[in-house]
Amino acid sequence: METLAKNVVSMIPGLKPFLKRRRDGFNRSLLRYRCYRYEKKVNARHMGWQHSGTVNYSKRSSELIFWYHKLEKGLCLPPENRRFFGQYPAQQTLMLLRKWRSDRLSCDATVYKAAIGVLEGYRDFVQNIDPQTTQVKQTLTELNAFLSVQDKTEDSYRTPIDFKLLPEDSYDVLYSLALSRRSTRNFKSQPVSMDIVEKAAALAQLSPSACNRQPWRLHLYQDKNDIERMLELQNGNRGFGHTIPMLAVVCCDMGAFFDSTERNEPSLDGGLFLMSLLYALQSMGLASCCLNWCVDPRRDQQGHRTGAIPDNEKILTFLAIGYAADDTVVPLSARRPLSDLIVEH
Ligand SMILES: Cc1cc2nc3c(=O)[nH]c(=O)nc-3n(C[C@H](O)[C@H](O)[C@H](O)COP(=O)(O)O)c2cc1C
């Protein structure tokens, strides 16, 4: 029967490629549907700030930052727009700080102290508003009630701060750093110290993120077997995977986001973090190569299991880190002309 069908197919011109196109199209649709359903499930399960049972530090801190950041940025608008603002965000911040304490989260946490720093800056602003309307007075009373029983924050948490101008040669310095960074696919066996990667991460952390929630997570693997097991799941390391002394997995905590309208933020925030990390590593003599995580849902779950990565963290990319081998060459990877990318309106 099968042979007969094959013979018929081969006798009709154009039928074989037609059937192949249909089959490929069907498989693509199926994959699209599976990826879409998986994404939807992950978003539904992990986005949003509701807490089931015990309080979740990551969600609570993201929500807190989200609200106090509205105050912090409002304090930096042009002077003519610095009319009274922020009553609701201030109330949300106060409510979340009270919950923070009643949930016994640490008051030494950076996020908590930063929130107090913002409230102090905001109070200075509210105090000087003229006229002191009922709304203004009410906000001031609420702020004073909370801050009066609170230790004053350290100076390092004072906000806003002055805008800094850089020396004129800064572009050249940055340009030469960008020019020298190239994806490297040949590493020395020399191990990479955790200290240096932490230093790079401390710089990458200065990247912008939506409402400054900093949803990044960086998983680091140095054990040869761990690296090998992770790289088996990835399709872009053939020929050099065995030389990688440290593997990083850049993830994004989905619990940092309030709902699915923020669905693009994980990749954006993560991408900004990743770029800064690459530059920081390069500036300290380390080489790197991003390794795509373009995988179907099953493979993604395997990646989470193998790397002991929690389900609420979206894996964005793998990253090879190490010292370039002595004889390393890198692709030129010529860039397109600017006219291909800039559209002037
Ligand atoms: C998200 C992402 C995924 C990548 N995945 C791979 C990969 O799997 N394997 C690989 O050898 N290179 C990978 N690369 C490196 C790109 O090929 C490289 O960045 C590009 O060719 C430009 O070259 P350059 O990084 O040297 O400037 C990836 C880069 C990015 C940004």
Image (cartoon, rainbow, N blue to C red):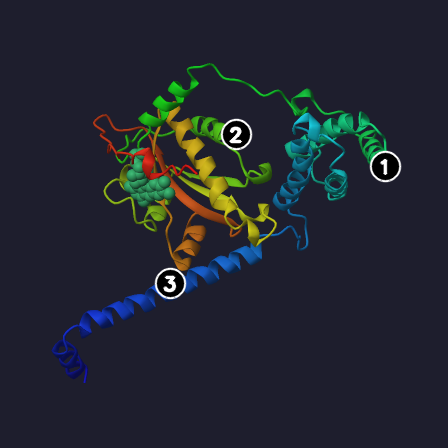
Quarter of the view holding residue 298: bottom left
Please rate how many residues cluster around mark 1, counting C-alpha atoms within 10 Å: few if below 14, some from 14 to 19, many from 20: few
Q: Give the residue type that dot 1 points to.
A: Gln
Q: Which of 164 and 212 is in front in this view?
A: 164
The residue at which mark 3 appears reads as 31
Please provide percent x and percent y for residue 129: 80, 28
Please state, as top left, top right, bottom left or bottom right, where the N terminus lies in the image.
bottom left
Q: What element carries label 2?
A: loop
Q: In this rendering, would 238 be left or right of 309?
A: left
**Residue at left 47%, top 45%?**
267
Q: Which of marks 2 and 3 is nearer the N terminus?
A: 3
On the image, which quarter does residue 140 sit in? top right
The residues tagged by marks 2 and 1 sit, at their Cα atoms, a distance apart of 35 Å
Mark 2 or 1: the one toward you: 1
Q: Which residue is drawn at 61% across and 43% down?
A: 58
Marks 2 & 3, CB-CB < 8 Å contact: no
Q: Is residue 30 left or right of residue 70?
A: left
Residue behind mark 1: 138
Where is residue 286 shown, x and y percent of the image? 35, 27
Q: Does 96 sit above or below residue 288? A: below
> Disc 2 residue type?
Leu
CB contact under 8 Å: marks 1 and 3: no
**Residue carrying label 2:** 206
